[in-house]
Image (cartoon, helix red, strand yellow):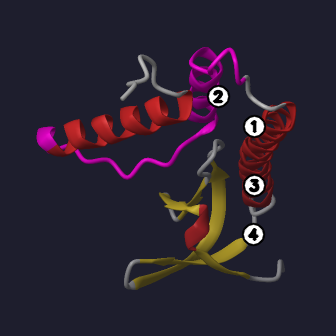
Amino acid sequence: MDIAPTISGVNQATLEMQVNAFNKTLNGTSSSRNLDKDDFLKILMTQLQHQDPSKPMEDREFIAQMAQFSSLEQMTNMSRQFTELSAAMKGSQALSLVGRNVEVLHGDESVTGLVEAVTGGIFPQVMVNGMYYDFDEVAKVMKEN
């Protein structure tokens, strides 16, 4: 009976993930982290490094995996850009409230007053009656007099 002296890239990547998962459970720091583009690239590189030279990876498989990697990277970039666009839109909406009367729902209380100032950033805040409230807490904007 012959025993292969090398392990295939796919088997090694699978074994490595299983060992890492096992080690995390032993340490009590089990993580529910999803694979990202870096993990995908590491698996692909491991496959290429440990492939059998007499049976190299099929061109179609390699092209399909590269296409998947490219799609994953584009989706990641689009997600980041949508987050940035959303933050910019919130900031713009918050700025448009300066000088307007609003109703803010903060916990169980309702606060009505004039928006005196607005902070910038990803999570803008509005100042009403000398107190800052999250922009997301603005429930109503009243017509200007």
Residue 6 placed where, x, y %?
A: 45, 19
Q: Amino acid at mark 4?
A: Arg
What separation in Å lies between label 2 and label 1 (alpha carbons)? 9 Å
Check disc 1 and report the residue beneath it.
69
Check disc 3 and report the residue beneath it.
86
Residue 100's disc is 4
Viewer-side label of 2, 3: 2
- Tell whether label 1 touches label 2 (CB within 8 Å): yes
- Tell whether label 3 touches label 2 (CB within 8 Å): no
Relative to 67, does residue 12 appear above or below in the rendering?
above
In front of the other: 74 or 70? 70
What separation in Å lies between label 2 and label 3 (alpha carbons)? 34 Å
Describe the element under mark 3 as helix, strand or loop: helix
Span colored in magenta = 26-55
- Tell whether label 1 touches label 4 (CB within 8 Å): no
Q: Earlier in the sequence, mark 2 or mark 1?
A: 2
Q: Amino acid at mark 1?
A: Phe
Q: Earlier in the sequence, mark 4 or mark 1?
A: 1
* Label 1 environment density (alpha carbons within 10 Å; few <14, some 14–19, many ≥20): some
Describe the element under mark 4 as helix, strand or loop: loop
Q: Amino acid at mark 3?
A: Ser
What separation in Å lies between label 2 and label 4 (alpha carbons)? 56 Å
Residue at 80% x, 32% y is 58
Q: Earlier in the sequence, mark 3 or mark 4?
A: 3
Viewer-side label of 4, 1: 1
